[in-house]
Amino acid sequence: MQAFALDRWEINMKIGAQLYTVREFTQTSKDFANTIKKIAKIGYETVQISGISTSIPATEVAEICNAHNLEIIITHTHPDRIKNDTAALIKDHEIMNCNYIGIGAIPGSYGHTKQGFENFVKDFTPAATAIKKSGKKFMYHNHDFEFIKFDGKTALDYLSENLPNTGFTLDTYWVQMGGGDPAFWIEKLAGKVDVIHVKDLSIINGERRMSEVLEGNLNWDAIFETCKIAGVKYAMVEQDDCYGADPFKCMETSLQNLKKQGF
């Protein structure tokens, strides 16, 4: 585990669990309840609802999380629901007492072209506006392909400049994979980045891999210092691929590493 000098600043962010990491264990109500129990036992106090079965209603999600004192911070919701079922989706988030309604990425059907991003903005602006009016915030989560450039600017720049009433769940790993600097982008989008995803990047046998936070090569000194400056409120631990390891253990390792550094 790499060490960094967190004593240089006060840490105000809350650390949470991005449930996409353990998505294979959230596909029934029983499994979801068991998973939430495990996440709470590991020591997490907040969660992101992502990758769980759509058959589990918001009321049940809220009841299970409340039973284990886990606050629901943000979701990743299917794009069709965001665009076409916005009012009901907002009600679900009210039930879960969740203020951030997230989309995992631009749907693949749009393509990663300038026209595709323009169409996406046009189609999702009404939902983003309705979400804003409800007192909640629409959040866009990046991967690496948002760093493609059109007319000298990245697609992420375009989204920031043209998609109104929208925040960004910046993913540290994917920013780095896109050739960006996570700290730079957190600062650049300051005021729009209430939530980030934290996972590390390692090189193992010549292959880039996702790894537990503080087990890889990302510049966490710069990332967390910039988070304070930019007013980031939540850092959700995520590891999309655990490469055969127990994902609950991976989530535990990340949290333990962060706690050792002062979180």
Image (cartoon, rainbow, N blue to C red):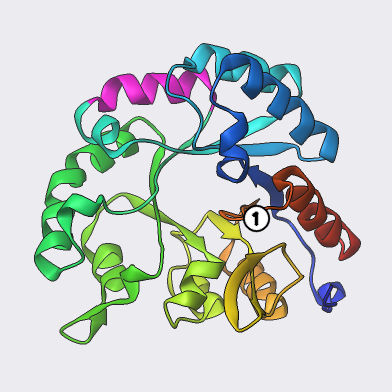
Q: Nearer the viewer, residue 262 or 116?
A: 116
Q: Number of callouts in the render?
A: 1
Task: Give the side of residue 220 with respect to residue 197, left or right.
Answer: right
Return the x and y of residue 201 as percentages of the image width and height: 62, 73
Q: Give the residue number, with chain letter if any, for mark 1.
A: 242
> Looking at the image, which residue is at 83% across and 39% down?
42
The image quadrant of residue 225 is: bottom right
Task: Give the side of residue 37 with respect to residue 140, left or right.
Answer: right
Q: Residue furthest bottom?
A: 152
* Quadrant (top left/top right/bottom left/bottom right) for the N terminus: bottom right
Q: Is residue 137 above or below residue 208?
A: above
Q: Residue furthest right?
A: 260
What span is in magenta?
85-97
Q: Was residue 88 drawn as part of the magenta stretch in this picture?
A: yes
For mark 1, give the secondary structure: loop
Return the x and y of residue 180 as percentages of the image width and height: 45, 81
Q: Was residue 94 drawn as part of the magenta stretch in this picture?
A: yes
Q: Nearer the viewer, residue 23 or 166?
A: 23
> Looking at the image, which residue is at 45% across and 25% down?
93
> Looking at the image, which residue is at 51% across and 30% down?
52
Task: Give the side of residue 108 with respect to residue 195, left or right.
Answer: left
Q: Amino acid at mark 1?
A: Cys
The image quadrant of residue 208 is: bottom right
Return the x and y of residue 253 as percentages of the image width and height: 81, 55
Return the x and y of residue 88 as percentages of the image width and height: 31, 19
Q: Is residue 206 above or below residue 254?
A: below
